[in-house]
Amino acid sequence: MEQDVFYETAREMRRTERQVVTRGSWRWSVRVAEMVAWSMTFLVLIAVLLGTAAPEPRRAALGVTAALALWLVVLFRILLPRVGQHRWVLSVALVVDLGFAAALFGILRTEVPSMQLVFVPVIVAVALLGRLEEAAAAPALAFAAYWAIAAGAGRSPDPAVLVLTGGIFFMSGATAGLVADELRRHLRAEHEEHRLATAVRHRLMAVLDAVDEAIVFSDRSGVVRVVNRRAAELFDLEGNDHLGAPVVQLLRTLARKTEDPEGYMETFQRLRDDPGAELRVDLEQILPARRRLQLYSGPALDETGTLVGRIDVYTDLTEAVRRAEELERAFETARKTAESYQRSLLPEVVPKVPRISFVAHYVPAAGRRVVCGDFYDFVTFGDGRIGVVLGDVVGVGPEAVGDAALARYTLESFATEESDPARLLRRLNDYFATRLAPERFVRLFLGVLDPERAVLEYASAGHVPPVVSRSAQDVEWLEEGGIPLGVEEDAEYKLGRVELRPGDMLVLYTDGVTEASRRGRPFGQGRFTDIVRDYGIGTPGELSQAIRRSVDSWVGGESMRDDLAILICQVAPDEALEEPTRELVLPNETARLRDIRGFVVSFLADARVSVDVATEIQLAVGEAAGNAARHGRKGDGWSEVRVRCRYADGRVTVTVADDGPGFDPGAVGDDLPDKFASGGRGLFLMRQLMENVEIDASRDGTTVTMSRSVG
C-alpha cells in the first residue's frame, strides 16, 4: 500500500514537472543541455570500453569520465537549479567542461579517431544555456584548446582538418545559439500573448460581469468557456465549477430551476439539426426565486463567418413586468377618469320640444387604451331656438377630453352673446387658435333650430357633412363648411339654411361612423346614405339603431378605434301630431332608470293620463326597464335600452327593448311567484298593471310591449 502511494506520488511529480517545463524556457534549456552532456559522457564511456586503447590511457580516460559525471551532477542538480542564470556560473561551467573535454581529447586523441568532436557537446550545451556571446565564445575557446593540444604534442593537424574542425565547432555553436535564441523569442512572445489574452479576458469578464444579463458562452465543441457573475447569481451556481465542462451538463442544471425542465431542454434539441439557429424563449424560473426570464441563444461567428461557439443571454424581466403592470394600472386609472369625465360632457337628457323629436346615440371607442374627444350638446338660446352641437377633437387620451370640455363650455359661454352659427364659429376659432396645441384642432357642426318654423341655420368647421332624410326617401347633404377650429386665425365660415318639412330627419354623425374599418376598408358614406334612405321613413330611434348595428356588423370582430356619435332630429309627421310618439335611447345602466321614469311621466302628462293610471303605467315600465338593466346587458360590449311611448285612440303603448342575450318568458308563470323564488315578480306586476303584455326574446335582445287603455 505504501509502495503504491510512493509510486503514485512520484508519477504525479513527474507529470507536474513535465507540465511546468515550457519549450524555450530556462528549465527547458537546462534539461536539453543536461541531456547533451550526459549523452557525450556515455558516448565517451562506450568508446573507451569498446576501443583498443592501451591500459594506461584507458584508466586515465575512465577516471576523467568519472570526474566528468560527478561534475555534471553538481552542475545540473545543484548549481544551476539554485543559482540560476548568472553569467559567472556559465563561465565556470564553460571552463570546467572545456577542461574535461581537453583532457579526454589529450588522452584519447591517438586512440580514438575524430576525438576532437568531444568539444561539440560542450559548445552546444553552453550555447543553449548562454546568450549569443557565450555561443560565439565557446567554439573559439574549444578550437584554441584543440589546436594547442594537437600542436603541443608535436604533430600539428593538417590545415584541411583544422578548417573542417573549426567549421564544425562554430556551426554547432551558432546553430545551437540561434535555435535557443529563437525558442526564447517564441517563449517571450507566447508569454506576452498570454498576458495580453489574460488581460483582455479579465477586461471582457469585467464587462460581462457588469451587465444585467446572465451570459453563458460555449465553444464549438460544446464546452463552457464563460459564465458571468450575473448568471451565477441568477441561477445560484458557482460559475467556475462549470468552466471546461460540457454545456449539456450546465443546461441540465439550469433546466431543473425552471417551471418546465423538459420544455427547456427540448428548446435546445433544435440545435442538433441547425447549429446556427437563433432561439428566443420566455422562461418561468422557480429556483432560487420565481422570475420571468427571456432567453436569447445565438451563434458566435468569427470574422470569416465560421461558427466558433454559442452565446446564451438570459434577461430578467421580472422587475420590468412588474413596472409595466404598475404603469398599466396607472394608465387604466387615468383612462377611466378621462372616460368618466368624457361622459360627463354629454347631456343627460335631450330637449323636449313640441313637434320636434331628438335622439342622441353615443358609443365610445373600443379598447382599454382608447379615450377620444367626440361630444354633442344642446344649447338653448334666448329667443327659444335650440342649438344642436356635434364636435370631434382630433387625438385621443385625457388631452382630447380636456379640449372637448373646453370646446363645449366655451361655446355655451359665447352662445349667451351670439346666436348666429357662422359668427359663433369665427369667434370660437379665434379663441382656439391661441389656446390649442399646434397638433390639435376641433371639427364641429353647429346648427340653430327654430322649432316653430322648423328652419335650421348651420355652419360647419371641418365636420363631416350632415344629411337630411326627406319623407319621400330622398337624402340631402348639407355641404356648407370651413376649416376646423384652431388651425388658423381669421378663418371665415359660411352660413347655411335648410327648411325641414314634417317627417324630415336631420342626421348628424361623427367620422367614427363612416371611417369604421374592416381589414383596412372604411364603412364609407355610400353605405351610410343607403341606411338613411332605407330607415329614414321610420322613427329617429329606429334609424339610430340601424346605423349602429350596420357599423357593428361591418366592423365584425375588430375593435372600433374611434367614438361613434349620432344625433337625429325629426320634425313630427302631420299624422302624428294628434297621436304623439316619443322615443328615448340611453345606456343600459341601473343609474339611468330615473331618466326613463321621468321620460314616461312627461309623456303621460302630455297625453293627459290620470295620476292613478299614470302611476301604474310608470311602475310597470320601471319593472321592465329594471329587468333590462339587470338581464339585458351584453357581456363584453356597450349596451343600450330603448323606450318608446305611443298614444293612439285612447290607448298608451310602451315598448322597452334591450340588446342583451334574452331569456325564456315561458319559464315564468302568470301566478305570483313563491316568496323564496329568485325572480319573476316584475313580470307578474307588469301583467297585473297593464292590460296587454307581450315579450319577444331572442339572441339579439328582448322587447317588452305593454299597452293599456287610458280613455
Image: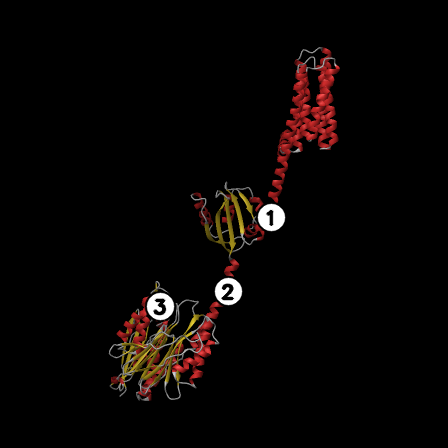
Q: Secondary structure at mark 1?
A: helix
Residue at the image point whose x is 51% and y is 50% from the top: 313
Q: Quadrant of residue 177?
A: top right
Image: 445 above or below 332: below
**Where the C terminus falls, by quadrant?**
bottom left
Badge number at residue 203: 1
Q: CA distance from mark 2 to mark 3?
A: 32 Å
- Which amino acid, by three-letter code, is at mark 2? Glu
Of labels 2 and 1, earlier in sequence is 1
| Residue 600 image position (x, y, % from top left) | 34, 83
Query: Is residue 441 among the parts visible in the rendering?
Result: yes
> Mark 3 = which residue?
516
Q: In this orientation, which residue lies closer to the viewer: 243 or 650?
A: 243
**Secondary structure category for the residue under label 3:** loop
Q: Is residue 61 above or below residue 345?
A: above
| Residue 17 visible here | no
Residue carrying label 2? 326
Of badges 2 and 1, nearer the viewer stands 1
**What's the amino acid at mark 1?**
Arg
Q: Residue furthest front?
A: 159
SS for tag 2?
helix
- CB within 8 Å, label 2 to label 1: no
Viewer-proximal residue, 640 or 445?
A: 445
Side of 25 where 659 appears, left or right: left
Residue at 68%, 16% (x, y): give it.
159
Report crowding for label 3: few under 14, some 14 to 19, many 20 or more residues within 10 A (C-alpha): many
- Which residue occupies 66% across, 30% down? 29
